[in-house]
């Protein structure tokens, strides 16, 4: 690990170091990538520790059970691994491939204003995307109320072709076929 001089401004979180594994400095790593092993395609990693931002280099990794374990250069024992537990794994967003047509990174969707329809089919502000999660059937947007939204409701809106009408990243908006009463 080396202190990071230039932490990327466009950084994006792609995982987290969860717990020590064994006695030789290995760590369980949680991955936000799909498939999860793609986390190792994006190096170097930046992590924030008590000592500040660090650049970490992956020495080895392997699938283990339903997860992944990683050996980092300069982390050679359990104590060193324990000191990194809970650290988020970040990369420069420029390392990611461009999203395809009508594909979006979740990080680009968080914070978008969601515009739906009221009973008169007029456009209304339903709130702002707070997070997204997978259900197996489809992804779901958690939309939280803002000062400008029509009410104080939190909504779970499916990411589905019949629901999501248009995404305008430049305007910071997403248009959905979703009524106020849903």
Image: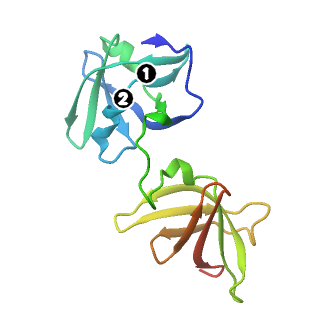
**Badge 2 is on which residue?**
19
Question: In the figure, 171 relative to 83: above or below?
Answer: below
Residue 57 at x, y = what percent?
36, 18
The circle drawn on residue 56 is: none
> Residue at the location (51% across, 75% down)?
163
Q: Which quarter of the rendered picture does the N terminus lie within?
A: top left
Judged left or right of residue 150, residue 66 is: left
Q: Nearer the viewer, residue 105 or 46?
A: 105
Question: In the figure, 12 relative to 151: above or below?
Answer: above
Q: Nearer the viewer, residue 52 or 78?
A: 52
Question: In the figure, 54 relative to 150: above or below?
Answer: above
Q: Which quarter of the rendered picture does the C terminus lie within?
A: bottom right
Q: Nearer the viewer, residue 84 or 129?
A: 129
Report crowding for label 2: few under 14, some 14 to 19, many 20 or more residues within 10 A (C-alpha): many
Secondary structure category for the residue under label 2: strand
Residue 92 at x, y = what percent?
49, 31
Residue 80 at x, y = what percent?
38, 13
**Badge 1 is on which residue?**
84
| Snapshot quadrant of residue 114 | bottom right
> Residue at the location (20% across, 40% down)?
65
Judged left or right of residue 3, residue 70 is: left
Question: In the figure, 35 relative to 18: above or below?
Answer: below
Instruction: Pick whichever of labels 1 and 2 is earlier in the sequence.
Output: 2
């Amino acid at each position: 690990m080396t202190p990071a001089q230039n932490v990327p401004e466009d950084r994006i979180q792609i995982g987290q170091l969860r717990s020590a594994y064994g006695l030789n400095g290995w760590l369980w790593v949680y991955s936000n990538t799909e498939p999860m092993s793609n986390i190792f395609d994006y190096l170097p990693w930046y992590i924030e520790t008590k000592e500040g931002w660090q650049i970490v280099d992956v020495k080895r990794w392997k699938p283990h059970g339903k997860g992944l374990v990683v050996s980092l250069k300069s982390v050679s024992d359990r104590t060193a691994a324990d000191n990194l537990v809970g650290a988020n794994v970040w990369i420069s967003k420029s390392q990611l491939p461009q999203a395809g047509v009508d594909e979006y990174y979740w990080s680009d969707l968080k914070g978008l204003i969601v515009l739906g329809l009221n009973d008169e089919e007029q456009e209304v502000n339903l709130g702002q995307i707070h997070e997204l999660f997978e259900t197996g059937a489809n992804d779901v947007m958690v939309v939280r109320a803002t000062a400008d939204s029509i009410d104080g409701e939190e909504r779970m809106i499916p990411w589905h072709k019949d629901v999501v009408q248009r995404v305008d990243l430049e305007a910071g908006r997403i248009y959905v076929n979703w009524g106020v009463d849903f």
